[in-house]
Image: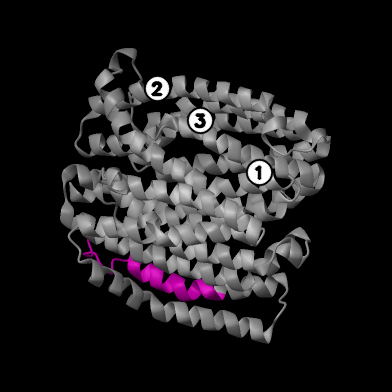
Amino acid sequence: MAELLVPSRAQYLRQLGSFYVTDLLAVGVFLVLTPLLLHHLGNARFGVLAIADSVLGYIGLLNLGLNPALTRFLAGSEATGNRERTVSLLSTSAMLFGVLGVAGGIVASLVAAHIGTLFNVDAAVVDDCARFISIKGLEFIIAMPLGIYAAGNYSIGSMVKMNGVRAVGGALETLLAFVVVWTGSGLAMLAVNSLCITLATGLLQRWSLRRAVPNLNLRFDAIKPGLVRELFSYGLLFALDNLIVLLVFKTDDLVIGAVSSAAALASYAVAGQVSRALTNTVGRIPGTLFPALSALAAKNDRDTLRRVFCRTIDACFATSAAIAVALAAFGGDLIRGWLGIQPEALPDVVIYCFAAFAMCHAPVSAGSKYLAAAGLMKRVAFMTIIEGFGNLGLTLILVRVVGLPGVILATVIVQISTTSWYNASQAARDMALPLPAFWRDRVLRFAGPMLASGALAVLWRVLIPHPSAPVAIAAILSCFAVHGLLAWQVLRGAYAEPAVL
């Protein structure tokens, strides 16, 4: 069944491409809506969106890691042809997610009732912020049980359809945001729009899964207490990892929101969202293969796992290097020009730190996905705890010493010293890959292209110190071309037999 566990090269590229097309549409929505909403809502209310997003991100921890656990176990049950287990997994998860969704809605309501005392939010926008979070809590109640259908599509390889539904949601978000601006509505209407989109896309995911797997009906009698324990035993370890991710990504916004004003958060939040959107392209490479890795682990196909992992981490390095160089060389000018802000509002050093973060994210992404698929999350639990709380502590120190740049600088320092090397090393060790040779190969493979694209970026900046937006975009594309060729070569099977991927 190897051909069923690992998608063909054409299938994989279609699946990965569907993620990238959907993400590109999401970036387009972000580029269109951010300036529009920033000018419509004002800095204070726009900053509230970032604070609310962070709060809701923490409420999302009530997922307890069950979504990736469901994906992993569904991929395994389908790989072994156990359809009854598939039905039981979905039925049990629907019950669990429904209960956890209600709990999340209650927490959101409590936070909304005390938002003015928890954060340094301008008095004029406290009521709007409270309504926004309350409605988003209701959305959470709906989104949790509906999320099992997206996980199902992901697990069985119906990623193109799953991402098609995501694209529909992005189109609706853009349309309804224009309605909000045109009617002069505020944060509450944005939240209502998001709730409606979540409901519509969740039902579309359900329709797609039922078409792909006929007669897949949820049943009350299929809820199994044993599966509850199985899902939690794995999911709670993943929840710990999610908590660390939130501490790393959301601490920045919360610290700025607590020690400064919501308005001061706007420019940093935009830069952070741009950086995370770019690094998300790295995560898509192993993320697309997560169901296949889970299925291979269930079948204990070690040789294929080794080949797929080596190819995946190399592709991640190639992509993250391109992002790092392009962001460091041209990201600051583009973002400041796009938002119409001065350099002191978003210093170059902040952009450089975001670029460094993009580079050190590659081994974390590839290593984590392998360890999750192989059920080895216990190996990284202690290191992820160190990363999360180390980031929180160092952020609180550096933000007072060097100001705004210290927020992202703390993230870079902590990640480089913890999970960037540790997660990938643990994955390599599990596959019996010698660590010195493993890391030496990574360095030798990417030193040349990294130097080439770096030199190209420096040459651009020397010849054109302050490029216009079209020129900067052309320079960024040239950086991506250098690494894109390498990533393509890797994805074509540099470490794999022609029949695999």
Q: Nearer the viewer, residue 114 or 281?
A: 114
Q: Residues within 10 Å of mark 1 (few under 14, many from 20)?
A: many
Marks counted in the figure total: 3
Q: Nearer the viewer, residue 266 or 295?
A: 266
465 to 359, vertically: above or below: below
Q: Nearer the viewer, residue 489 or 37?
A: 37
Indicate whether residue 481 is drawn in magenta: yes
Distance from Cα at disc 1 to Cα at disc 2: 29 Å
Magenta residues, start to end: 478-501
Residue type, label 3:
Gly
Q: Nearer the viewer, residue 178 or 9?
A: 178
Distance from Cα at disc 2 to Cα at disc 3: 17 Å
Instruction: Say whether marks 2 and 3 touch (CB < 8 Å).
Output: no
Q: If you read the primary sequence from the N terminus, does the residue marked by circle 1 or circle 2 appear first?
A: 1
Label ID, residue 50: 1
Image depth: mark 1 or mark 2 in front: 1
Q: Residues within 10 Å of mark 3 (few under 14, many from 20)?
A: many
